[in-house]
Amino acid sequence: MENPRRYSIEGLGNWGIAEGLVFENWEERDFDVEELKNSRDKYGNQKYRELHGLDFGYTNDPTAFIALLADEKKYEIYIYDEVYKTRMKNKDIYETLKYKGFERARICGDSEDPKTIDELKDLGLYRIFGAKKGQGSVKAGIQKLQDYKIYVHPRCINTIVELSNYIWAPDKETGKPTTDPADEYNHLMDALRYATEELNSRNFSW
């Protein structure tokens, strides 16, 4: 068995909270999505930003899409929808997101695959764009998210699984957590980072 922990979780269904979690600032909570979307502050402005992230996969790694609402003043994030599936062709991605009502959404996708982003634009996801990547961007994105309280709708099962098992990679000799996240249970976590990369930024555009 190459990865007994993964087998225990995915093969046997034992996906309890793992040790050394990257994110401990989250909880599962049922909430009314439309109520949040329609919330306004005292000036009549929309309280929550609607954010979307997309991480590409195919055979072994799933394509992962995440949708959330963020309150930058209260530092709260509400994750309310997801896509998590392998072997999705670009047309499948487009049709799935269109069916879910995200055809016109502004989506931040993995910039390592610009061809896929361009093809999705041609198919009809006109507002998709590539994430900004660079040295230290993963840790910076994680640190930003750690400042927020994250609520996950019960229907987002795969997000709950990843948040429960996204850990700091253990040191090969000591077994103690390092300062680098493990390269597993991170597909929706990557999509979450992409979606929130412009939070608390003056450069954000709707």
Image: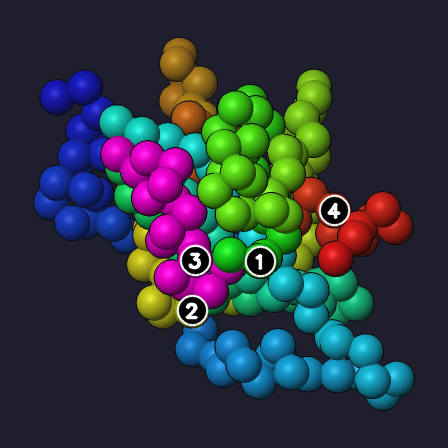
Of pointers 3 and 4, the one earlier in the residue sequence? 3
Distance between the alpha carbons at the discs numbered 4 and 1: 19 Å
Q: Residue at x 52, y 24 (%)?
A: 115
Say which element carries label 4.
loop
Tag 3, which secondary structure?
Answer: helix
* Residue 73 point in image, percent of width and height: 79, 67
Question: Which mark lies nearer to you, 2 or 1?
Answer: 1
Q: Amino acid at mark 3?
A: Lys
Q: Confirm whether the magenta stretch covers residue 174.
A: no
Magenta residues, start to end: 87-102
Location of the N terminus (image quadrant):
top left
Number of residues whose C-alpha sits closer than 10 Å to that of mark 3, classed few (under 14), some (14–19) or many (20 or more): some
For mark 2, give the secondary structure. loop
Q: Is residue 44 above or below residue 29?
A: below
Q: Residue furthest top?
A: 173
Closer to the chain start, of discs 2 and 1, is: 1
* Residue at 36% over, 53% down: 96
Give the residue type at disc 2.
His
Q: Amino acid at mark 4?
A: Glu
> Which badge, 2 or 3, is on the more N-terminal residue?
3
Judge from the rendering whether residue 102 lies leftward or rightward of residue 106; answer left or right. Answer: left
- Residue for badge 4: 198
Residue 177: percent from left, percent from top = 48, 28
Q: Which residue is mark 1?
A: 104
Marks 2 and 1 in Cβ contact (< 8 Å): no
Return the residue at label 2.
Answer: 153
Q: Residues within 10 Å of mark 2 (few under 14, many from 20)?
A: many
Q: Residue at x 62, y 77 (%)?
A: 37
According to the picture, the residue beneath numbered tag 3 turns out to be 98
Q: Observer-nearest residue: 78 or 82?
A: 82
